[in-house]
Amino acid sequence: SKPSYKWQRVLLKVSGEALAGDHTQNIDPKVAIVVGGGNIFRGASAAGNSGLDRSSADYIGMLATVMNAIFLQATMESIGIPTRVQTAFRMSEVAEPYIRRRAVRHLEKGRVVIFAAGTGNPFFTTDTAAALRCAEINAEVVLKATNVDGVYDDNPRRNPNARLLDTLTYQEVTSKDLSVMDMTAITLCQENNIPVVVFNLNQPGNIAKAIQGERVGTLIGG
Ligand code: UDP
């Protein structure tokens, strides 16, 4: 049988694209979620295509993650999961500001905490926000929900013989440029010994498996 891990607290990273699908899954209370915004707006590409400066574009991107967070909150509460949204910059009429100790308190009380607005800084990504919040709230793992089964040794769209990898080291991710997450995010995980599980969100039951510490997708560590 495959090895399993009993996580006490996890940080689930859900990209914007993943939210665009329709799936309902059970989510364990000891879960914090960092939500992306790429389904609505991505700063770097928007800035390249227009006269928009990068920082402004990134603030729009961060606001996009707030939209997704509110959507996710409403959806989760409609199926009876208590949640709190915390934003990296103040939007007090809409959500709580990010306060680390308060976030931890919510988790202890069995609420799912949804972190929105990324890190609050332009030039970063929500993957980096996931690594950062994971370290801050002492979660044990970043569970990166994506649209692919995990990390391959080559691009599966171009190479039909590309193999899905079971495990990977941080070193391999950075040196082989496997585009799992951006460098800032992966090195932050490495420096803080945070394992990352990359798995497919579209496969029913996968979120529950990942949260319960069953092996899904690719495990990055050591
Ligand atoms: N963003 C940012 N700082 C952050 C996190 C996000 O400026 O700390 C902006 C950035 O423009 C990014 C957009 O928000 O393109 C949406 O986030 P991301 O691309 O990480 O979303 P995902 O790919 O997870 O859907």
Image (cartoon, rainbow, N blue to C red):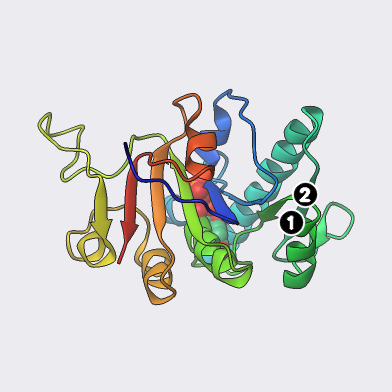
Write down the quadrant of residue 159 in the picture.
Answer: top left
Residue 2's place in the image compared with 32, above or below, is above
Residue 154 in the figure: left or right of residue 132: left
Q: Residues within 10 Å of mark 1 (few under 14, many from 20)?
A: many
| Residue type pointed to by label 2 | Arg
Give residue 111's mark: 2
Q: Is mark 1 on a helix, strand or loop?
A: helix
Q: Residue furthest bottom?
A: 191
Pointers 1 and 2 in contact (CB under 8 A)?
Answer: yes
Q: Residue at x 43, y 72 (%)?
A: 188
Asked whether mark 2 and ligand 1 are closer than 8 Å, the reply comes as: no
| Residue type pointed to by label 1 | Leu
Residue 21 visible from this viewpoint: yes
Q: Residue at x 75, y 40 (%)?
A: 73
Nearest the viewer among 42 and 178 is: 178
| Residue 117 percent coordinates (x, y) | 65, 58
Q: Mark 1 points at which residue?
A: 107
